[in-house]
């Protein structure tokens, strides 16, 4: 590896990290503003124009607050757990491509932390590691309530992870038919969603000309399952039992100050990363019109990133909208939805989608 | 090649460090007095195994180890510990007087596995799998040449699942039996 290549890798990782921190600041503010609008309130408006600096103020406040350590904690695990929450949250986003690759001085720069050819597997592995933060935070607090909260949150996370993984499998199977062989690389999955469905199905060209070739349309059921599962995975309303107002047993009950803020940060980073993954898998990632030739090259270079952020924020908005709309589920309803609706639904959709794919590829089973 | 020559390559340094870390954490798995700590040392040992796979450029296997063993099996271990007898605070008595036979059994397994792999591969260099991708090669091998062992494993898992349900299910008392019939 030559030096320019090395610096490009460093720059890619740092840029991805910075993007993630910036959007998280905006996310917290956007959520408060949008929720306020939906509830006919004003929301934050004192700190900075439209209250945009409110998150910075809150962050500083949490930073200077005393972080109380209760007497009966398992000190090592207690201090480690917040980091275990934050690190996977940041790593997940590292494999998501957030712009079109461009060439600078003969070196190709992919706007992505790392282009793993098993990107989807990496995402699943990282999101399963996030469970450790919850279970260890609950256990190490040395009190019954966080322990119960931790157990409940763990059960929720592992239940919905299965549905999330199955929805991803359906997309991977479909994506394999859209190019040369199957792939688990996110940049490859994005590139296979370029163009419109009109290019693929010439018979319906006049109608489908304006329909982008996103996986969303053939895989709409997988999208619904995936989105429900990621809302539950990130512990957001209506699945936010771990931090609900009427429940005193959250896994982070015994955390305060900066350590609590790290759990909070991990949640918001996860909302953005998961929305970005959904946008990548279903909404075509950074694909979109770039008006090559009719606008300056710099504009058509930046436009893919703009499309990517627009799609991701559309999903982030959906997260907030769902929170403002739906009532919270009871714990048994949560488990029933996961195990009796989502997982069988995801399995049924996987079988159906695979049957259609193999029918289209190999014809009916009796045709030898 | 002498040991000093072997140490000349930085890759072998990493291998040595990771290997020693795996050995240490595996030893702690069986000696830790706290059951949660034992489970966490097992996580460390499996993480080390994943790093070894990564060093052999077997990315797919490495992340599957993380996903399946660390992310699912051990989370379920911890979950099981938490809902049964979560030891908050000092936990004593996690020990057994019967140490000799398990130790002998483990050493025997180790010798058998090492002997078998040396016999099978000897000094053969590991070849790079993975044209076009290692995932594809693995998938084809798993559902082609190794399809019968693969299915047998899934059958064993199913049997274990049914067995687990049967053992865990509590027999109903006569009164509850009555109640159920009434509904």
Image: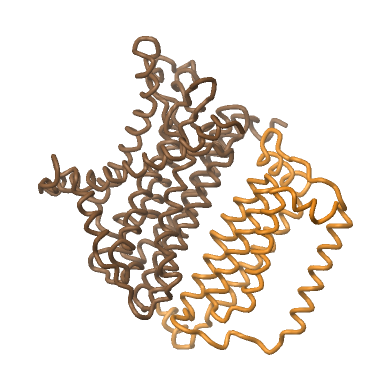
- A307 and A88: which is toward the camera: A88
Q: Tell me the residue at 50%/28% (across/down).
A: A109
Q: Tell me the residue at 51%/34% (across/down).
A: A7
- Residue A78 picture quarter: bottom left
Q: Report the residue that reaches farthest toward the top.
A: A294
- Residue A147 picture quarter: bottom left
- Residue A264 picture quarter: bottom left
Residue B1 spot, x, y in % from top left: 85, 51
Chain that is orange in the image: B
- B96 and A333: which is toward the camera: B96
Chain that is brown in the image: A
Is the residue A152 above or below the residue A231 in the image? below
Q: Tell me the residue at 54%/87% (across/down).
A: B92
- A6 and A147: which is toward the camera: A6
Residue B62 spot, x, y in % from top left: 63, 51
| Residue A241 seen anywhere in this rendered image of the structure | no
């Amino acid at each position: 590896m030559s030096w320019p290549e090395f610096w490009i890798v460093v720059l890619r990782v740092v840029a991805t990290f910075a993007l993630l921190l910036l959007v998280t600041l905006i996310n917290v503010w956007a959520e408060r503003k949008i929720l306020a609008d939906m509830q006919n309130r004003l929301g934050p408006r004192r700190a900075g124009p439209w209250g945009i600096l409110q998150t910075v103020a809150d962050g500083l406040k949490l930073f200077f607050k005393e972080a109380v350590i209760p007497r009966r904690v398992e000190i090592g695990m207690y201090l480690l757990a917040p980091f275990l929450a934050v690190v996977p949250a940041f790593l997940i986003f590292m494999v998501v491509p957030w712009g079109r690759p461009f060439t600078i001085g003969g070196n190709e720069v992919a706007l992505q932390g790392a282009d793993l050819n098993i990107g989807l597997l990496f995402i699943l592995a990282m999101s399963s590691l996030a469970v450790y933060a919850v279970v260890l935070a609950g256990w190490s607090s040395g009190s019954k309530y966080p322990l119960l909260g931790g157990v409940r949150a763990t059960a929720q996370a592992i239940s919905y992870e299965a549905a999330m993984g199955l929805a991803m499998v359906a997309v991977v199977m479909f994506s394999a038919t859209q190019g040369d062989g199957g792939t688990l690389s996110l940049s490859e999955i994005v590139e296979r969603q370029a163009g419109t469905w009109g290019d693929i199905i010439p018979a319906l060209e006049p109608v489908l000309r304006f329909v982008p070739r996103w996986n969303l349309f053939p895989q709409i059921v997988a999208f619904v399952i995936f989105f429900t599962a990621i809302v539950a995975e990130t512990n957001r309303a209506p699945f936010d039992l771990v931090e609900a107002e009427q429940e005193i047993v959250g896994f982070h009950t015994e955390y305060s100050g900066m350590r609590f803020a790290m759990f909070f940060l991990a949640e918001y980073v996860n909302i953005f990363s998961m929305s970005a993954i959904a946008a990548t898998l279903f909404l075509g990632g950074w694909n979109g019109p770039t008006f090559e030739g009719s606008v300056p090259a710099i504009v058509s270079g930046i436009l893919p990133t703009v499309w990517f952020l627009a799609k991701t924020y559309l999903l982030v908005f959906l997260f907030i909208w769902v929170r403002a709309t739906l009532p919270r589920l009871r714990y048994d309803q949560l488990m029933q939805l996961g195990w009796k609706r989502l997982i069988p639904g995801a399995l049924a959709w996987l079988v159906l989608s695979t049957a259609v794919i193999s029918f289209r590829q190999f014809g009916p089973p009796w045709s030898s | 090649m002498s040991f000093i020559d072997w140490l000349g390559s930085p890759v072998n340094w990493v291998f040595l460090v990771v290997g020693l870390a795996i050995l240490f954490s595996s030893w702690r798995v069986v000696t830790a007095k706290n059951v949660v700590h034992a489970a966490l040392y097992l996580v460390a040992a499996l993480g080390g195994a994943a790093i070894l796979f990564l060093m052999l450029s077997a990315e797919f296997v490495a992340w599957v180890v993380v996903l399946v063993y660390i992310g699912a099996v051990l989370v379920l271990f911890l979950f099981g510990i938490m809902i049964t007898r979560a030891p908050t605070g000092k936990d004593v008595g996690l020990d057994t007087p019967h140490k000799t036979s398990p130790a002998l059994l483990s050493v025997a397994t180790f010798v058998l596995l090492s002997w078998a792999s040396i016999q099978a591969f000897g000094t053969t260099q590991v070849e790079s799998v993975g044209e076009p991708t290692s995932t594809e090669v693995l998938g084809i091998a798993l559902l082609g040449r190794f399809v019968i062992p693969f299915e047998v494993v899934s059958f064993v898992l199913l049997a274990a699942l049914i067995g687990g349900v049967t053992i865990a299910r509590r027999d109903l008392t006569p009164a509850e039996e009555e109640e159920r019939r009434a509904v």
